[in-house]
Amino acid sequence: MDKNIITIDDLSAPILTEAAQAALAMVADMSVSLNPDEILAEAKDTLSLDDFGDMEFVSRLTLLCEEWSQDRTINNLGLLGLRGKLVTFAKNRLLIQDLLTRHPEIHNVKIEAPIIVAGLPRSGTTHLLNLLAADSRLRSLPLWESYEPVPTPGEEMGENGQDPRYERCDAQWQAMQQISPLMAAMHPMNPEHIHEELELMGPDFASYNFEWLSTSPRWRDYYFSTNQTPHYEYMKTVLKILTWQDGDVTGTQTRWVLKCPQHLEQLPVLKKVFPDAIIPITHRDPVSVIQSAATMVAYGRRAIRDSIDVPAIGDYWADRIYKLLEACVRDRSQIPAAQSIDILFHEFLADAFATIEIIYDKAGLVLTDKARSELQDFMDNHPRGRYGQVTYHLKRDFDIEPAALREKFQFYFDAFPVKAEI
C-alpha cells in the first residue's frame, strides 16, 4: 500500500493522540465562559487601550457567544479555543482603531486592481493563491499577519529576530499538529502559508468564517440576512493599513493577490468594494468539494467536542456549498469578462501555467522570466500531496450517495463545464 495515502476511519469515534488527551485533561476542570463583556474587558486590559471605534459590532459578538455557549457538545478545550479567537479579534480591533486614530492618512491609501481569487473551498483556490503569491511583484497575506495585522506597540522581536506574531502563529501550528496531525495533509496552517483576507473581517466580527470554527446555524442565518458591504469595507481598510505599514503611503506601488470562497456568494459586494479587481473563479465538482470540506471539518473537531455528529456535518456543508454555488450562478454575470476568468479545476491541475498566463493577461501583468522561475520554484517545492493524500468516503462517513447529491447541483453543471470526479 502507498504510504502516502491516508485513510481517516475514526471521524465519529476519534482515537486521540497523547497530546490531545493531555490537553483535555489539563483543562477538564476549568470554568470557561463566553461572555462578551469579559472578552472585551480582557482585550482592553491586555493592551491598555479602550477605543473599539463603532460599537455596533457588539451585537454580533454577543450572538456568537450565545450560540456557542448553548452548544453542549463543545468541551473546555473547544471553548478555550473559541474564546481565544474572539479575544484576539477584540485586541486586533483595538490596535486597528488606535492606529487609524493616530494616522488618519491611512484612509487615503489606495488598493488598486487587486487580483482576488474566488471559488469553492477545496477547489484549488489555496494552491492558486499561493502560486500567484510566489511572484515577488505581488503582495500577499501570510497566515501570521492575517491573525495579527497590527503589531502590539512596544513588543520586541524574538531572540532569533522573528516577529513575535509569527512566533505565536507557529506555536499554534505546532500545537495543532500534535492534536490533529493529519491536518497538514488537508490544509496546512504554517505561519508563512498565504491565507484568506477574510481573517481581516474578524475584528469586525463578520464573515462566514465563524461557520468553520464551530457549528453556527444562527450565525449563518444572521449573515445571510445582512448586507456584507460594511464588512468588506472594513477588510479593505485593514489592507490599507498593511500597505501603509509596508511603507507604501499611497498604495500605488503595491498590488495585492487575495482569495476567499465567501466571495462566491458576495460577488456584487466584492465588485462594489473593489471595482477594479481582477477576479479568477475556480470551479470543481461540488461532490468532491463537499466530501473533502466535511471530512476536514469533522477531523478538526476530534479533540474539541465530546461527540461529533459526522452525518450532520455532511448535511450542513452540502447545504452550505449549495448556497455558495446558487449565488455564484445567479450573480456571475455581474463581473465583467474583462475582469474575470472561470478556471476549471481539472484544467488548472493539468496545466497551471496556462491558467496563470490567462490571469496575467487579464491583470495586465507580464509573465517575465523571473516571475516564471519564481512560480516554477514554488510548484517544485510544493507538490500536491506532499504531506500525504487523504482518501475520502462520502457514503461510508456521511451516509450521502454521491450520485444523488450530484443531481441537486445540476444547475451548476449546466452553467459551467465542470468535470465529475466521483
Image (cartoon, grey):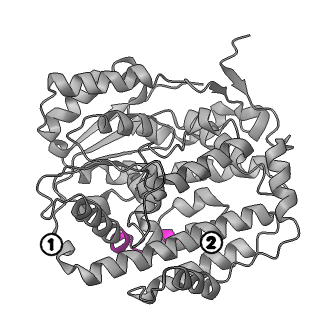
Q: How many numbered marks appear?
A: 2
Q: Position of residue 379 (x, y in %)?
A: 38, 23
> Which residue occupies 64% across, 31% down?
403
Given contact means CB atoms under 8 Å apart, are the residues at marks 2 and 1 in contact? no
Q: Main secondary structure of the magenta part?
A: helix
- The one nearer the camera, 50 or 402, is 50
Q: Quadrant of residue 358?
A: top left
Q: Is residue 165 or residue 259 the one in the foreground?
A: 165
Label ID, residue 218: 2
Name the foreground residue: 403 vs 153.
153
Closer to the chain start, of discs 2 and 1, is 1
Report the residue at 86% width, 40% height from top.
15
Horizontal relation, residue 31 to residue 90: left or right: right
Q: Which residue is mark 1?
A: 108
The amino acid pointed to by label 1 is: Asn
Q: Nearer the viewer, mark 2 or mark 1?
A: 1
Q: Is residue 98 visible?
A: yes
Q: What separation in Å lies between label 2 and label 1 (alpha carbons)?
A: 36 Å
Residue type, numbered disc 2:
Arg
Q: Which residues are magenta?
A: 223-231
Q: Position of residue 422 (x, y in %)?
A: 60, 25
Q: Residue at x 16, y 55 (%)?
A: 276
